[in-house]
Image (cartoon, rainbow, N blue to C red):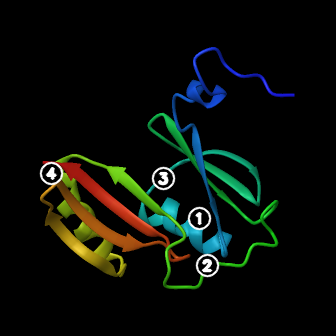
Amino acid sequence: MTSKQPNGSAFDAICAVDYTVVIVRDMAAMRTFYQGILRFSVARELSENWIEYQIGPTILALSNPGRTGQDVPTPMGSAALQLAFKVPVRSVDACAAELADQGIAILSPPTNRDFGHRTLFFRDPDGNLIEIFAEI
């Protein structure tokens, strides 16, 4: 049984992205990266297979495969997703310097883009694309 909303779709009620789940290959490496390199604090750990970080109003969760256990892994070197983290302008270059100091390969150094962002790109241990950006 479906319930059609008077003004369209029931999906019109979606008002925010509450949380994003990253399905991980190597939980230990990903945890080290997100906590040690990006310095995210654990907001909640439901089990050894589920770790949450509160980033502003959004939760970023790391999870070992569960419901998606039969999915074919994304090949290494190919991003399964891109996460973009907004920072003040001065922080883009500072983040790049910290990544370099910790031996993290930078895919694209801090660059001013035509669409009004200063961006920095690198990968997490699972190969996902990470962007640090600021509006300029």
- Of circles 1 and 4, the one toward us is 4
Q: Which residue is mark 1?
A: 31
Q: Mark 4 and mark 3 in contact? Answer it, CB < 8 Å.
A: no
Q: Is residue 95 left or right of residue 53?
A: left
* Left or right side of 5 for 115: left
Q: Secondary structure at mark 2?
A: loop
Mark pair 1, 2: CA separation:
19 Å
Q: Which residue is mark 3?
A: 40
- Residues tagged 2 and 3 counted as in contact (Cβ below 8 A): no
**Left or right of 46 on screen, residue 132:** left
- The residue lying at 62 percent from left, 31 percent from top is 11
Q: Is residue 48 placed above or below 11 in the rendered structure?
A: below
- Cα–Cα span, label 4 and label 3: 26 Å
Instruction: From the top left corner, tell me how far across and down residue 122 is, in percent.
Output: 36, 73
- Which residue of the protein is positioned furthest toward the right in this rendering? 1
Disc nearer the start of the sequence (4/3): 3
**Residue behind mark 4:** 116
The tag earlier along the polypeptide, 2 or 3, is 3
For the residue pair 17 and 10, the one nearer the viewer reads as 10
According to the image, label 2 marks what residue? 74
Q: Give the residue type at disc 1.
A: Arg
- Which numbered disc flags the more N-terminal residue, 3 or 1? 1
- Disc 4 versus disc 2: distance between alpha carbons? 31 Å
* Sooner in the amino-acid sequence: mark 4 or mark 2: 2
Q: Amino acid at mark 4?
A: Gly
Q: Quadrant of residue 59?
A: top right
- Residue 114, by quadrant, is bottom left
Label 2: few (<14), some or many (≥20) within 10 Å?
some
Q: Residue at x 34, y 81 (%)?
A: 105
Local crowd size for mark 4, using a 10 Å CA cut-off: few (<14), some (14–19), many (≥20): few
Task: Give the residue drawn at x 53%, y 38%.
Answer: 17
Q: Quick one: label 1 or label 4, which is nearer the N terminus?
A: 1
